[in-house]
Image (cartoon, grey):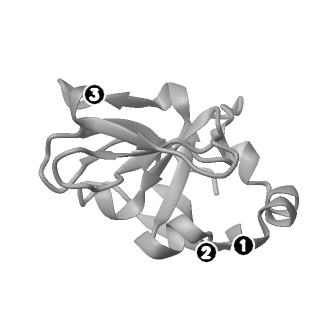
């Protein structure tokens, strides 16, 4: 789902963690059923790491949780506990942005797809999600 890139802003509930991300106005977001995402109700979209930037002193309010392979880096705000972004196992070279943490008004369309985190290896190989953290020549 390719479209023009725009600047989206977002962050956590208490606004201590703020960021900006360049992403299309029309995105594919993933609703994952892995043990962590299903407990949080996480729906996210993936962008190349180079298109994500923390703002101000946000870094001092972030802490990280890992489990299993420790590839995913689940970052969350030390103050309010919200995971507004993280490094996903599927795309360790990218950033997963929590859809609900985007400031409103910059998306025109969201297609939500199922991410089968309970059967991660199979999902990863058939989904094409790894490509979402790559910069393509048309972007």
Say which element carries label 1: helix
Say which element carries label 2: loop
Label 1 near label 2: C-beta < 8 Å?
yes
Residue at the location (84% across, 59% down)? Answer: 121
Residue located beneath label 1 in the image: 118
123 relative to 8 in the view: left or right: right
Q: Earlier in the sequence, mark 1 or mark 3?
A: 3
Q: Is residue 2 visible?
A: yes
Q: Quadrant where the N terminus lies?
A: bottom right
Residue located beneath label 2 in the image: 33
Front residue of this view, candidates 91 and 5 = 91
Label 2 near label 3: C-beta < 8 Å?
no
Residue 107 at x, y = what percent?
Answer: 38, 59
Q: Is residue 6 visible?
A: no
**On screen, residue 127 above or below 92:** below
Front residue of this view, candidates 69 and 125 = 69
Front residue of this view, candidates 132 and 32 = 32
Residue at the location (87% across, 57% down)? Answer: 125
Circle 3 residues within 10 Å: few <14, some 14–19, many ≥20: few
């Amino acid at each position: 789902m390719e479209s023009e890139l725009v600047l989206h802003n977002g962050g956590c509930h208490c606004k201590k963690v703020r960021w900006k991300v360049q992403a299309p106005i029309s995105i594919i977001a993933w609703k994952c059923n892995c043990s962590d995402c299903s407990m949080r109700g996480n729906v996210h979209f993936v962008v190349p790491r180079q298109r994500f930037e923390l703002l101000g002193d946000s870094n001092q309010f972030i802490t990280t949780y890992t489990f299993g392979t420790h590839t995913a880096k689940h970052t969350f705000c030390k103050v309010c506990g919200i995971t507004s972004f993280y490094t996903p196992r599927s795309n360790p070279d990218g950033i997963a942005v929590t859809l609900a943490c985007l400031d409103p008004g910059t998306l025109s369309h969201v297609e939500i797809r199922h991410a089968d985190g309970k059967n991660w290896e199979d999902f990863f190989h058939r989904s094409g999600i790894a490509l979402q953290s790559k910069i393509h020549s048309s972007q």
